[in-house]
Image (cartoon, grey):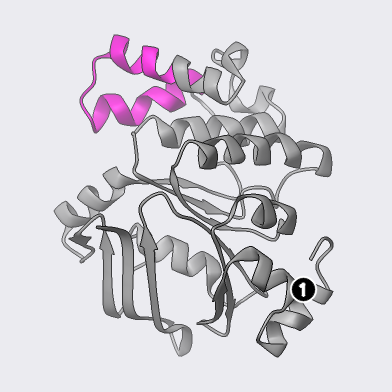
Amino acid sequence: MEALALRGVNKWFGRFHVLRDLSLSVARGERIVICGPSGSGKSTLIRCINGLEAHQSGQIFVEGTELTRDLKTIDRVRRETGMVFQHFNLFPHLTVLENCMLAPVHVRKLSRAEAEAAAMELLSRVRIPEQAHKYPAQLSGGQQQRAAIARALCMKPRIMLFDEPTSALDPEMVQEVLETMIALADEGMTMLCVSHEMGFARAVADRVIFMDEGRIVEDSPPRSFFSAPQHERARLFLSRIPGG
């Protein structure tokens, strides 16, 4: 079964047609990096997949469930998808551990002991167990983003969605987050990542998707995309990206 399928998806913001008849199929365990110029629809695509934005037409299937506006369906889809945002979105009044425990306790109905054990295991997995009892403001940006990844993993998702996870970080913090994501990829997690980190795309992606003006204009393995992009817009984009 496909992990994810989009069929003829359209999305408007007012008169702005941000996703245009977009279709995409992602196999379980596949790692996709989505790139393209600003305003091409990359983040909107990711946000539509777990219902943070509603698409107006077409179909989105997540692990066989069609995403509709029905709240039960949205909840079912969100149980399967972990989301990591550009700006972390950690609750500032909760410790890192409490951030990680919140959804498992209230959504998956784990006991506090079970949720804490799972959270500590995942904080160890992203190499920040010593930060568990600190508040987000006490962490570096890279540590906050790794905490956000652990929080998403606490819900045991089948698919991880990343929306520019390193773009808000200082350059020296980028690598530690990318290493965490590479480790996830090596474990076989299905991943869709909006990113301009072309080195990460070369190292991890099974496919690179290039978007422009709400459409997928290239969809190819990294070697083909970086050595011989087919679309002029992709060639121009790569010429302006360090490491492209």
Magenta stretch holds residue 70? no
Image quadrant of residue 155?
A: top left
Say which residue label 1 marks: 238
Sort mark 1 into few (<14), some (14-19) or many (20+) by Cα contacts within 10 Å. some
Indicate the amino acid at tag 1: Leu
Residue 95 x %, y %: 52, 20
Compared to 130, does 188 lie above or below? below
Compared to 145, does 71 lie above or below? below
Compared to 146, does 222 lie above or below? below
- For the point 41% across and 49% down, which residue is it? 29
Q: Nearer the viewer, residue 162 or 225?
A: 225
Secondary structure character of the magenta stretch overall: helix
Compared to 47, does 169 lie above or below? above
54 sits to left or right of 176: left
Residue 55 x %, y %: 33, 74
- For the point 70% across and 86% down, which residue is it? 233
Magenta stretch holds residue 97? yes
Image quadrant of residue 136?
A: top right
Q: Which residues are magenta?
A: 96-119
Can residue 116 be spotted in the picture?
Answer: yes
Residue 53 x %, y %: 38, 65
- For the point 47% across and 23% down, which residue is it? 122
> How many numbered marks appear?
1
201 sits to left or right of 96: right
Badge 1 marks a residue whose secondary structure is: helix
Residue 74 x %, y %: 23, 55
Q: Nearer the viewer, residue 74 or 81?
A: 81
Q: Nearer the viewer, residue 218 or 16?
A: 218
